[in-house]
Image (cartoon, rainbow, N blue to C red):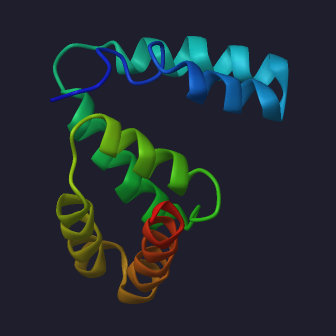
Amino acid sequence: MSKFKNAVLDDQDLQAGLSGINPKFGDFCTRVAGEAWGLPLIDQKTKALILIAVDVANQTLDVPFPAHVDMALKQGATKEEIEEVLLLMCVYGGFNKAAGAFAALKAIFETDS
């Protein structure tokens, strides 16, 4: 079950984090990403899992990968589903890229423990 109807517009902690980087950047991201997240055909959990795949492909594993993992978890994804996305990315994104993502994911879950 999704925690938020819109993973961007309904998540005040996410918005605060974006604004903490820069207020204008935070406002812009919230408005634009919020609109994209409000599109109706793909559910919030799937969108969050797609972002994790994009992070693997782009190798943005320090920022924003942890935020996207958090977003996916808030939308009802499990650690196992995230790991399955990373396994899929081994084949389509590259084994070394996925290895880095698995290491980053391990660090995220060790920090949360």
The vertical placement of 27 against 72, above or below, is: above
Q: Is residue 18 left or right of residue 10?
A: right
Q: Tell me residue 20's x, y (percent).
A: 80, 30
Taking depth in this image into account, of 44 and 94 the one nearest to the observer is 44
- Residue drawn 42% across the image and 54% down it: 54
Q: Residue at x 47, y 15 (%)?
A: 34
Q: Residue 81: x and y, percent?
A: 18, 59
In the image, is residue 8 above or below residue 112?
A: above
User: Residue 27: x and y, percent?
Assistant: 71, 14
| The one of 69 and 30 positioned closer to us in this rendering | 69
* Residue drawn where x is 29% and y is 36% of the image: 47
Looking at the image, residue 5 lies above or below residue 99: above
Q: Residue at x 35, y 73 (%)?
A: 93
| Tag count | 0
Residue furthest out toward the front:
113
Using residue 105 as the reference point, say whether residue 86 is left or right of it: left
Q: Quadrant of residue 37?
A: top left
